[in-house]
Image (spheres, rainbow, N blue to C red):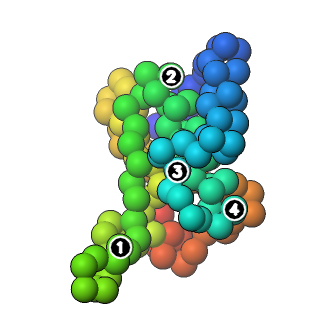
Amino acid sequence: MSDTTIQIDADAVESLRRHIEAAEVEGDPTLRPKRARRDRAHEALVVAVLAHLTLAGVMAWRNDTGMRLVAGGRRVPYGTPGAPDVLACVRPHGRLVGLEVKTGAGALRPAQEAFAI
């Protein structure tokens, strides 16, 4: 196996920085409303990772997991517990890569550790 390094130029980094600042200040539609500040930081970081990968030409998407409240007050789970936040298909061989995004304040939960094995 070989490591793949993704590089982007300074203009792309500046654009990404402005996008993150705008998301934090203006409320980017990709950020979920009414979240704790820590969770909003995580959401902004996920958006930044997706933007970075997209700028580098990597096909990547969010892989959300959780639970939603539906009509009648019923809770419906979705996704696989412990699955990574971002999935990406990396060229040239189409390798699927899972990225668990952490802001520095977070730690892996047991379900995430089990998923990574």
**Quarter of image, res 80:** bottom left
| Cα–Cα span, label 4 and label 3 | 11 Å
Q: Earlier in the sequence, mark 1 or mark 4?
A: 4
Q: Residue at x 57, y 64 (%)?
A: 34
Classed neighbour count for the residue bearing mark 4: other residues with Cα under 10 Å, few (<14), some (14–19), many (≥20): few
| Cα–Cα span, label 3 and label 1 | 16 Å
Left or right of 23, for residue 32: left
Q: Nearer the viewer, mark 4 or mark 2?
A: 4
Q: Position of residue 35 (x, y in %)?
A: 59, 65
Question: Do tag 4 and tag 3 residues touch (Cβ < 8 Å)?
Answer: no
Q: Earlier in the sequence, mark 1 or mark 2?
A: 2
Q: Position of residue 5 (x, y in %)?
A: 58, 28
Give 112 or 36, whichever is nearer the viewer: 36
Residue for badge 3: 31
| Kind of residue at disc 1 | Arg
| Kind of residue at disc 4 | Arg
Q: Residue at x 58, y 46 (%)?
A: 27
| Cα–Cα span, label 1 and label 2 | 31 Å
Q: Residue at x 53, y 70 (%)?
A: 113
| Kind of residue at disc 2 | Leu
Whether residue 34 appears in this view of the structure is yes
Residue for badge 4: 37
Task: Name the disc covering residue 55, or none.
Answer: 2
Q: Earlier in the sequence, mark 4 or mark 2?
A: 4
**Quarter of image, res 47:** top right
Residue for badge 1: 68
Establish if 3 lies above or below 112. Answer: above
